Image: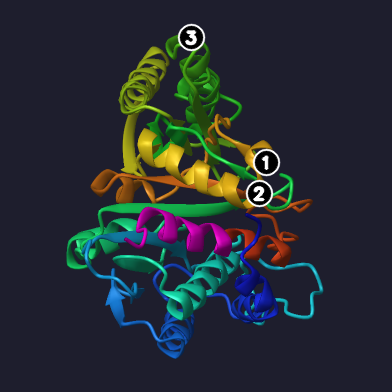
């Protein structure tokens, strides 16, 4: 059962929606135009309910099937926000907003779910409700948590929820998934090292915060290599260093900022503990002091086994079993769909975007030919999960 014929028939319209969204990127929760675009389309399709303002600027559309005996509801989620990146490709539909672009494909994810909404509203060949969740602020703002905290699951009776993300340089229209952890947790850390400033020519009269910072950066790399099991996956990256203002003064303070990633809560907690131990220990050895502050990010995106098998089976109906990887390697990037999976069973699946620049790259662009595969997946998932009696 390949791409749904009806969806293939209006694929050019999905492309037009996607390119309109691409040309008008918005960040974080400030997705008012995008949310308005989505709500307008959902109303035009004939959705039974269109609710705005959930999770601040999120939109939910509800489509009820021709049968209502089951009283069940399945949630499908797409993210709407863009990134603070300057687009460099001269596309006909390139970003019209300086310093902002859809560099992660959320324009494609939104267009895919709109395509599914149109199909499901036209056909309604299912028993129950399809709940279409359009989420703001995935890129660091925690919009998934905001919608969950606003009661999106309870208000619309969602019993299971599914999400999708494109993956560049994977075969176009292929799917990949795995049960259990599929994307990592993320935390930001800030290490402030306080030494004693002094003249660069008299280092013995100072406590060199730069030297302490350098040793700390090197020592932090021992966490993954020596305290995390070789069978686990983890990342510690120092990405920002600030110290001093001139060439001949040893600064009294240095600041390190970075991120940690893990695939289990236990590893996540252990790495936080190790960072504090190492930072304070290294500083103390040089006569300096260190403080560590963590800014908690997204939890692990943890696919539920039964729902993972289910969506993989549906994907295989569309593209064939050979084009569905069921034990894909997890990614160490993070995803706030994790909050929805903490509240309801469900799964997160990857869709091949074909040859492409990487995610968050200024030359990235979503492949419009991938959209009918995603929209067909959502359509068939609802029809399969909520069959007519």
**Which residue is tagged 1?**
323
In the foreground, 302 or 131: 131
Closer to the eye: label 1 or 3: 1
* Position of residue 383 measured from the top left corner of the image (x, y, whole percent): 43, 60
Element under label 2? helix
Whichever of callouts 1 and 3 sits on the residue coming sooner in the sequence is 3
Q: With 123 as the anchor, is 58 left or right in this view?
A: left
What residue is pinned by disc 2? 319
**Tag 3 secondary structure:** helix
**Residue 226: assigned label:** 3
Give the distance between the C-alpha atoms of the residues marked 2 and 1, in whole angstroms: 6 Å
In the image, what residue occupies the spot 23% across and 61% down? 70
Observer-nearest of 205 and 221: 221
Label 2 – label 3 distance at C-alpha? 42 Å
In this picture, which residue range is highlighted in magenta? 375-389
| Above or below, 73 relative to 198 | below
Do the residues bearing badges 2 and 3 touch, measured as CB atoms within 8 Å? no
Q: Are marks 2 and 1 in contact (CB under 8 Å)?
A: yes
Q: Position of residue 255 (x, y in %)?
A: 45, 39
Q: Is residue 266 visible?
A: yes
């Amino acid at each position: 059962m390949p791409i749904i014929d009806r969806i293939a028939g209006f694929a050019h319209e999905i492309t037009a929606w996607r390119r309109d969204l691409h040309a008008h990127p918005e960040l974080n929760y400030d997705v008012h135009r995008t949310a308005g675009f989505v709500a307008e389309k959902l109303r035009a399709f004939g959705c039974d309910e269109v609710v705005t303002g959930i999770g601040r600027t999120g939109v939910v559309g509800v489509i009820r099937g021709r049968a209502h005996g089951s009283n069940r509801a399945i949630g499908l989620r797409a993210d709407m926000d863009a990134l603070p990146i300057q687009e460099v490709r001269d596309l006909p539909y390139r970003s019209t907003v300086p310093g902002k672009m859809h560099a992660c494909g959320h324009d494609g994810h939104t267009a895919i779910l709109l395509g599914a909404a149109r199909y499901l509203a036209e056909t309604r060949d299912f028993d129950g409700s399809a709940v279409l969740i359009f989420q703001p602020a995935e890129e660091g703002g925690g919009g998934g948590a905001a919608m969950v905290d606003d009661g999106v699951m309870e208000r619309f009776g969602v019993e299971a929820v599914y999400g999708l993300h494109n993956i560049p340089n994977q075969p176009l229209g292929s799917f990949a998934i795995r049960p259990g952890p599929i994307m990592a947790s993320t935390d930001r850390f800030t290490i402030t090292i306080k030494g004693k400033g002094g003249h660069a020519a008299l280092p013995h009269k100072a406590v060199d915060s730069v030297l302490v910072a350098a040793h700390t950066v090197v020592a932090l790399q021992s966490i993954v290599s020596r305290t995390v099991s070789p069978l686990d996956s983890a990342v510690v990256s120092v990405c920002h260093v600030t110290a001093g203002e001139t060439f001949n003064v040893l600064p009294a303070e240095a600041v390190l900022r970075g991120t940690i990633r893990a695939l289990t809560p236990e590893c996540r907690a252990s790495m936080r503990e190790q960072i504090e131990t190492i930072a304070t220990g290294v500083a103390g050895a040089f006569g300096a002091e260190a403080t560590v502050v963590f800014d908690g990010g997204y939890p692990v995106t943890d696919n539920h086994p039964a729902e993972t098998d289910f969506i993989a089976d549906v994907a295989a109906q569309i593209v064939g079993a050979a084009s569905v990887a069921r034990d894909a390697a997890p990614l160490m990037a993070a995803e706030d769909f994790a909050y929805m999976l903490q509240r309801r069973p469900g799964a997160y699946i990857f869709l091949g975007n074909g040859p492409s620049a990487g995610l968050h790259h200024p030359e990235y662009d979503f492949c419009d030919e991938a959209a009918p595969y995603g929209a067909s997946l959502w359509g068939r998932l609802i029809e399969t999960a909520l069959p007519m009696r």
